[in-house]
Amino acid sequence: MRKLIEYFIRYHVAVNVIIIAFAIFGIVGAKSLKSSFFPLTDSKNISINITYPGASPQEIEEGIVLKIEDNLKGLEGVDRVTSTSRENSGTINVEIEKGRDIDFMLLEVKNAVDRVPTFPTGMEPLIVSKLEAVRQTISFAINGKDIPLATLKSVGRQIENDLRAIDGISQIEITGYPQEEIEIAVNENTLLAYGISFDEVAQAVGNANILVTGGNIKTDAEEYLIRANNRSYYGDELSNLIVRADASGSTVRLKDVATVRDRFAETPNASYFDGNLSVNTTITSTNTEDLITSAEKVKVYIEEFNQKYNNVKLDIVSDLSTTLVQRTQLLTENAIM
């Protein structure tokens, strides 16, 4: 220690260099730190989402979940597997052991799922993904006077696309409206006039609205996948569906016997802001994204949007960056004192 002090006394320039280096590296380090409202935690969960329209919870459990769980048994690095089966869907949660590489385990879980020989016909492709640890950053309401909910949803989707194009923002969720559905209101008198039963209409819609895989064809050079994709997602796509046709060439289409329209489900999921219908947009940050920077970019976008449009406006509902900035300022002032 005495020699160190003697060295600094003799070579005072070295002391100045070290102090300046500490200051420079300290400023650079402070600028590169990630801001977060809560401590960062690494994800250790992998989710397998199942969608099987028209299936009961028991069918999903026996036909899909148990097959996947059997392949996951004995997989090295898996701590626990839990599953939930619901009507039309199911979820399998795979918890990874501490210290394991989540990206490598994601690949292992996908391989285990792919080893299942067969799944029920009509099931949609499985979605295997890791659950990212996210933290709420900022949320705002999209609202306007006497604007329909469908228009607000369309504006919300456009805003979502705009925000995803901004560097540092990836997690966006839009809520505040019910699920969309296609309503087919069959006219009883029209059915009697054409001599068509209700079951015949339902069967025609079910047979035409399909998404199934029919195997594959292998050649020496290529492999072809046989897939019937005739699923409709909007009412106007079903309007010209043929319900009945005879040998003379005359046809009865769905629009002749029913009124087909797009609508929202009859659930009380709508939200309001200042007495107007609204759609809520929530921005969250991952471990690699800075909370304060993301919030500032969103607030700049909101300001530019409100200056550009008069009938639709964006109002901030919650902004955790404000609290985080105030906490940081308080810690800095205490440190200076």
Image (cartoon, rainbow, N blue to C red):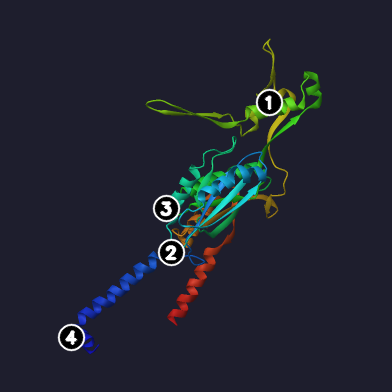
- Read off the residue under disc 3: 104
As measured in the structure, the alpha-carbon distance from the residue carrying label 3 to the one carrying label 1 is 46 Å
- Read off the residue under disc 4: 10
Pick whichever of labels 4 and 2 is earlier in the sequence: 4
Q: Amino acid at mark 2?
A: Lys
- The vertical placement of 259 against 290, above or below, is above
As measured in the structure, the alpha-carbon distance from the residue carrying label 1 to the one carrying label 2 is 57 Å
Nearer mark to the viewer, of 2 and 3? 3
Q: Residue at x 44, y 79 (%)?
A: 335
Nearer mark to the viewer, of 1 and 2? 1
Residue 300 image position (x, y, % from top left): 49, 55
As measured in the structure, the alpha-carbon distance from the residue carrying label 4 to the one carrying label 1 is 96 Å
Q: Amino acid at mark 4?
A: Arg
- The vertical placement of 217 against 322, above or below, is above
Q: Amino acid at mark 1?
A: Ala
Pick whichever of labels 2 and 3 is earlier in the sequence: 2
Q: Residue at x 57, y 32 (%)?
A: 212
As measured in the structure, the alpha-carbon distance from the residue carrying label 4 to the one carrying label 2 is 40 Å
* Residue 198 visible, this angle: yes
- Read off the residue under disc 2: 34
User: As drawn, which residue projects farthest toward the left?
Assistant: 10
Element on which disc 4 rests: helix
Residue 256 image position (x, y, % from top left): 72, 22
Dividing the picture into quarters, in which one does residue 210 lie? top right
Q: Amino acid at mark 3?
A: Phe
Pick whichever of labels 3 and 4 is earlier in the sequence: 4
Mark 2 nearby-residue class (10 Å; few <14, some 14–19, many ≥20): some
Q: Residue at x 48, y 47 (%)?
A: 112
Element on which disc 3 rests: helix
Q: Nearer the viewer, residue 106 or 191?
A: 106
For the residues bearing labels 1 and 2, Cβ distance under 8 angstroms:
no
As measured in the structure, the alpha-carbon distance from the residue carrying label 3 to the one carrying label 4 is 55 Å
